[in-house]
Image: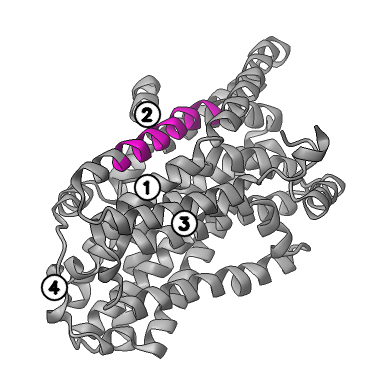
């Protein structure tokens, strides 16, 4: 039996195979409405399976983690560190994207009027809603008036807010709260087990999601904007290897060890273009990586709103790409203004669907680019979204280690053993 187990494909390889088959299906079934509908429904069912798991894991793990932390001063310190770290990394990401776009000038090689536009009405509607909401609306929305409504709507930040206070309340009543901690620990274990079951169908979900994207868009849509897509991907890769690599080095570990541990999650996030698809496994893995449960359960869900490094890179490159395509020369002052606007708008509407594209809608008018310009890059948004989602996932995993080490809540011995198990077997020894 053991002889055959050694030949079993890992989840990462299964997902890659699903990705390749999805590309083939996308080419074969280009503009085939029946196939597109089938693949769309299969992909949606997979994403729904993941979303079914996410909130129970966040509530159970975060509540238990905060209860074990037990100190509101410590929580405040961790929260402040986390937000400052997120803001610094996002700002660096925006600045890097702008530097690359200024150096390589992707927009000057494009005849914007020769490109085929795509429908962006759904993003326009979201952007109008976001404009009415703004930063204050977002801050007000963090506090839930009805936690069950927030759970039903899948609103992450209100759920995090409630779970933090619920955890502090459990810690405050001492021994009486132990029964709740035990119950929530059991819920977390059950949901992690369900996660492992759901991951078995991930290759099918990936195949469907990639297939439908290419079947709707077609390979031909990539060719005119290939240089823009290539620049975005090279910049994102450089951000991971150089910027995140330096941060990891400063805090005494290797970015390559982290990438080795979460490689399956990176592939899954890339393939589905959904950060939520990997949230349950990320919480589980970063706990095993050595960071305390309280830090992991707080940092990763919060990062889904405040730490979108890949999205920040894309937004800055796309904004300057469109400005160059329309022959709009931006001064240093205008570009600094653009950086500040991107910092604010990305935080204000990070939780809405298609957030990166909506941020661009809310931003490009400040530099004189017509909104119609976005119709020309809407078609390839899904392809770039895959890359920026993968970067977001790596950024949030790095953040948990950085905050954990800064709080001296990182188990070095546990981390070394976990990394060693990946280097030796490709998967940890305890994996099923």
Q: Give the class, few, some or many, for how many residues have Cα within 10 Å of label 4's Cα (few <14, many ≥20).
A: some
Q: Is residue 204 in view from this perspective?
A: yes
Distance (Cα) linking label 2 and label 1: 33 Å
- Residue drawn 36% across the image and 58% down it: 346
Mark 2 residue element? loop
The residue wearing badge 3 is 20
- Residue drawn 60% across the image and 50% down it: 12
The residue wearing badge 2 is 144
12 or 300, nearer to the observer: 12
The residue wearing badge 1 is 209
291 or 223, nearer to the observer: 223
Distance (Cα) linking label 3 and label 1: 12 Å
Which callout, 4 or 3, points to the residue nearer the camera? 3
Distance (Cα) linking label 4 and label 2: 37 Å
Q: Give the class, few, some or many, for how many residues have Cα within 10 Å of label 3's Cα (few <14, many ≥20).
A: some
Mark 1 residue element? helix
Please provide percent x and percent y for residue 415: 80, 49
Distance (Cα) linking label 1 and label 4: 31 Å
């Amino acid at each position: 039996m053991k002889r055959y187990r050694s030949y079993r494909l890992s989840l990462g390889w299964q997902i890659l195979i699903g990705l390749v088959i999805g590309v083939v299906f996308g080419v074969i079934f280009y503009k085939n409405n029946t196939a597109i509908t089938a693949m769309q429904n299969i992909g949606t069912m997979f994403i729904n399976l993941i979303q079914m798991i996410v909130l129970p894991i966040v509530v159970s793990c975060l509540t238990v983690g905060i209860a074990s932390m037990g100190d509101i001063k410590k929580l405040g310190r961790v929260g402040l560190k986390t937000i400052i770290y997120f803001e610094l990394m996002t700002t660096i990401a925006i600045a890097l994207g702008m530097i690359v776009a200024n150096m390589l000038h992707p927009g000057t090689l494009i005849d914007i009027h020769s490109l085929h536009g795509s429908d962006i009405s759904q993003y326009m509607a979201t952007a109008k809603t976001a404009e009415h909401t703004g930063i204050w609306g977002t801050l007000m929305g963090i506090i839930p008036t009805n936690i069950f409504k927030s759970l039903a709507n899948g609103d992450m930040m209100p759920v995090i807010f409630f779970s933090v206070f619920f955890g502090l309340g459990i810690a405050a009543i001492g021994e009486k709260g132990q029964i709740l901690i035990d119950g929530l620990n059991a819920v977390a274990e059950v949901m992690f087990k369900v996660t492992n079951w759901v991951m078995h169908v991930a290759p099918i979900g990936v195949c469907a999601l990639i297939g439908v994207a290419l079947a709707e868009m077609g390979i031909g849509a990539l060719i005119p904007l290939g240089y823009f897509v290539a620049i975005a991907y090279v910049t994102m890769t450089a951000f991971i290897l150089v910027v995140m690599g330096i941060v990891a080095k400063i805090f005494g570990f290797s970015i390559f060890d982290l990438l080795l541990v979460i490689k399956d999650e990176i592939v899954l996030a890339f393939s589905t273009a959904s950060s939520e698809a990997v949230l349950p496994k990320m919480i589980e893995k970063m706990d095993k990586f050595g960071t305390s449960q309280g830090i992991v359960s707080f940092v990763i869900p919060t990062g889904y709103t405040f730490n979108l490094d890949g999205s920040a890179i894309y937004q800055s490159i796309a904004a300057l790409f469109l400005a160059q395509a329309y022959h709009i020369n931006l001064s240093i002052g205008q570009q600094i203004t653009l950086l500040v606007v991107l910092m604010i708008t990305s935080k204000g509407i990070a939780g809405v669907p298609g957030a990166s594209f909506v941020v661009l809608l809310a931003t490009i008018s400040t530099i004189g680019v017509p909104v119609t310009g976005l119709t020309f890059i809407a078609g390839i948004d899904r392809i770039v979204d895959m890359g920026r989602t993968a970067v977001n996932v790596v950024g949030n995993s790095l953040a948990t280690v950085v905050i954990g080490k800064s709080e001296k809540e990182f188990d070095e011995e546990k981390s070394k053993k976990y990394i060693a198990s990946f280097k030796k077997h490709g998967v940890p020894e305890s994996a099923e």
